[in-house]
Each structure stands twice: as structure tokens, then as C-alpha cells.
Image (cartoon, rainbow, N blue to C red):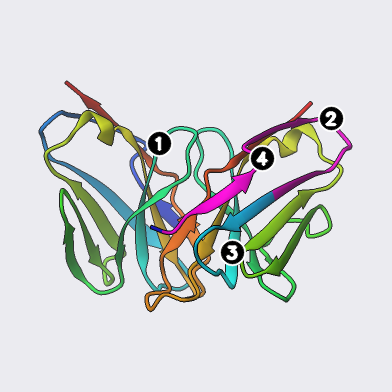
Amino acid sequence: GAVVSQHPSRVICKSGTSVKIECRSLDFQATTMFWYRQFPKQSLMLMATSNEGSKATYEQGVEKDKFLINHASLTLSTLTVTSAHPEDSSFYICSALNSGRGSSYEQYFGPGTRLTVT
Amino acid sequence: GQNIDQPTEMTATEGAIVQINCTYQTSGFNGLFWYQQHAGEAPTFLSYNVLDGLEEKGRFSSFLSRSKGYSYLLLKELQMKDSASYLCAVDQTGANNLFFGTGTRLTVIP
């Protein structure tokens, strides 16, 4: 099946620093990727839709200047959390749509990145 | 407003059948997904319904009624490994940006 990887799997950073999270589709091309955030014991909240070669679309309430998204190729999207604060500590999960499949509805999720800001 | 409701927790016995309900009120509807998520891991796809009716896939089945804004996930012959959270999600726009429910934490006991 389709595989999506994320790097790093865990990261601890100090308040005020920036952290970059990578999301890669390993065996398929993904024109569209999604970034979600999940707080403990809560469900996934969509942050933004990442489109290859164009600007990301952010959900209401998500600061685009704080959460920078770059989808520079068909297999890679990055999320940079700038000037991180403790309240940004969360589980960040990306997903990707297989551009080549006839059925385009199925999203493949990455394993997630646990960010802890101290 | 938009809302997806699921029971927060459920407990069932190994070998039994359990039904997890999901009701939704969303601005648009282009399909409903069920995902399984083990603690600390990414969700894995279980099913997708866009038309009314029952979709069966092995031990898991999913039902949708668009007129009632209602879906359920049916798990048969429960196994201990089925202990996980089950997430109901709606594609509101057809662009695959999913609106997730809060999830149902299922515990399977011997």
C-alpha cells in the first residue's frame, strides 16, 4: 500500500525557536497533502491543505505566518512552526492523496510528529 | 454550526459485535470516512461511504443514511487488537479536506 513518512517522529525545542516537519509520499505522487494537529484525547483538526506548486490553503483560525507550508515537489511537503510556544505542543500528522489513483478520495496518513515546546 | 457526534468511549467483549454510531451536521457532504487510530499512531483508513447503504469489508462494515445525517461502523468477531479509537470524518467540499469527529475509544475485553 501507499506509504507516507514524516520526519522527525519526535522533536523537543525551546520556546521561540522554529521547527520544520517533513512529510513525504514514498511510493506515489501527491499533488495534495494535508496537515492536521491533534491534542491529547482529541480528534484531528485540519490546519491546512498543501498544494504542489501553489500556496497552501489554511483553515479558519490557523495563522499562516506562524505555520509555514511549502509543497515544493510531488512527494514532499514541509510544515515549519515558527517562534514555537508551549501551546504549540501537539501531535502533527500529514496525509497525502495519491494523484495517480483512479479513486482519489483515500488519504494516506503519515505516522505523525510529536512536538514538545519547552 | 458544524458538528460530528460520536460516543466518547465504548467497551465490548472479544468475539462480540459492536456498533459505533456517528451523526453529523455539516455545511456540505461529499462522503464519509471511518478511520482507526491506535494511541500515538496515525489513522488508518477503514471505509468510505458516499451513497446510502451498507458497505461490507471483512469484519468491518459501514452504513450511511444521508437523509438522516447518520452513519455507523460495525465491527464483528472483535479481537483484542481492535482496541483503538475510531474516527468518523466528513468530506464537506469534495476537496478531501476532512472534518473529523472527536472519535470513539473502543476497549475490547477478554
Check disc 3 and give the amino acid type. Met
Q: Please name the amino acid that badge 1 sits on.
A: His
Q: Nearer the viewer, residue B91 or A24?
A: A24
Assess whether mark 2 and mark 4 are in contact (beta carbons under 8 angstroms).
Answer: no
Q: Share a chain, discs 1 and 4?
A: no
Q: Chain of mark 3?
A: A
Residue A12 falls within the magenta-colored stretch: yes
The image position of residue B102, as x and y in percent, is 45, 45
Q: Residue furthest front?
A: A27
Which residue has dot 2 on it?
A14
Q: Which mark is residue B38?
A: 1
* Left-right relation of B43 to B11: right
The image shows a total of numbered marks equal to: 4
Residue closest to the eye, A82 or B1? A82
Which dot, 4 or 2, sits closer to the camera? 4
- Identify the subunit bearing mark 1: B
**Magenta residues, as a range?**
A2-21
Q: Which residue is at a point 13% across and 43% down the rendered structure image?
A: B76
Mark 2: give few (<14), some (14-19) or many (20+) Cα within 10 Å. Answer: some
Counting residues from the start of the chain, the first of labels 3 and 4 encountered is 4
Q: Which residue is mark 3?
A: A33
The three-letter code of the residue at mark 4 reads Pro
Question: Residue drawn at (42%, 54%), measured in percent from left and top?
Answer: B4
* Vertical position of residue A102 compared to residue A56: above or below: below
On-image quarter of the C terminus of chain A: top right
Label 1 sits on a secondary structure element that is loop
